Image (cartoon, helix red, strand yellow):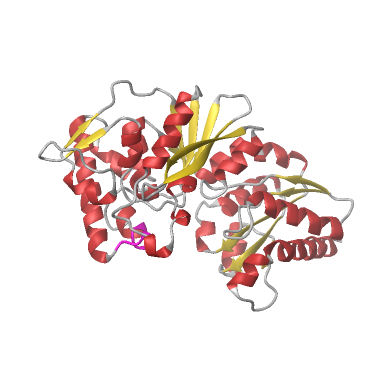
Amino acid sequence: MQIILAPDKFRGSLTASQACEAMAAGIREALPEAITHSLPLSDGGEGFLETLVQATHGSLHPITCHDPLMRKIEACYGISGDGQTAFIEMATVSGLALLKPEEYQAMQTSTYGTGELLKAAIEAGVKKVILGIGGSATTDGGIGMAQALGWQFFDENDQLVEAKGASLSTIHRIESPANPSDVELIIASDVTAPLFGPNGAAYVYGPQKGASPEEVELLDKGLRNLAARIAEKGLGISSLAEVPGAGAAGGLGFGLMAFAGATIRPGAELVMELTGFQNALSNADLILTGEGKLDEQSLQGKLIGRICQEAQKRQIPVLALCGTLAAKPAQLQAMGLTYAASILRSPVSLEEALQTAAERLREASFWAVHLYCVGKN
């Protein structure tokens, strides 16, 4: 039996690669003769960089840059083995996980560090850059990223404004860099939010980044102002703000389109394409996947949902393991899952669950494959 191992990360406990290792160990106990193929995946958020560097036999390149609050840190971009494509995971430099809860400040955070990584990758001579933009701490419309690439933003007094969320409403004039890059940019994101409005970046994601109700309104107003100034500059038509994904990462999706000519692709779909997932299914008998939380969002074009779509085309059963199982049986069945279960067998503290995730995933993989084989026979 050939089994494809295709998990996402288990947030806070296991990377996708570590999840593959735990799954493989459990399968070896249940079915020693099974052949496993590890394909760690991502939807554009945490683990995106590691997944694509590993899949393309690439390398990591560290630089000194700035975190969301403009403190110096070291972060990496990746380059594929053939040297043609760079990979950036914005969460590693502009992500919420870099901040303590008391530091969540949507008005003050910036994507400047993401721009620094992007600039370094472009200067490395690649032809294409793919950016995973999940897990952000920012709501600056991408002006921090743009500033790092040489764009300048001025207020009505013709003074430079700081590239952060609080400055969006004060932008009056925009100046482009003298030598803009022509490198192809692709955004990997499964967020479909527009830039502004009740379903936009500020209202939907601002609160989890520390924005109060009043600040959410200010940020939304600022994002509207940015879109208007972009339209005046002739960098994009007004409908650019309505493109699904423009509101991703606090408007970084919009900023990358407007300031760098980027295009948006569904993150899970793009990663599966780059890792050769479809080709790997040609001889597969079973797929074992998983993630930290399996819920209704997993049904909406997220990674496991897309895995099921591909598997159904070839009538390959899919078993899913997760830390938290929050979807209803009917939803899981509609998704196309053959089996789904939490790796937690008894009530435990969050700390213990995170610390023992690998062992629990190994055991759950053993039982999932064992039960599948018993049922099949």
Residue sticking out furthest to the left: 157
Q: Position of residue 102 (x, y in %)?
A: 38, 64
Between residue 203 and residue 192, name the one nearer to us: 203
The answer to whether 231 appears left or right of 288 in the picture is: left
Apparent side of residue 63 relative to residue 375 in the rendered image (left or right): left
Q: Identify the residue at image location x=32%, y=33%.
A: 259
Q: Is residue 189 visible?
A: no
Q: Point out the stretch of residues depicted in magenta.
A: 205-211
- At x 54%, y 58%, the residue is 298
Where does residue 233 sit, x and y in percent of width and height?
A: 20, 31
Residue 27 placement: quadrant: bottom right
User: How far across and how far down the image is residue 338, in percent?
Assistant: 69, 60
Specify the quadrant that holds the C terminus. bottom right
Would residue 227 be counted in the magenta stretch? no
Please give the name of the residue rendered at 28% of the width and 26% of the height, measured from the top-left corner: 177
Question: Is residue 321 visible from the viewing direction of this image?
Answer: yes
**Residue 37, located in which quarter of the rendered image?**
top right
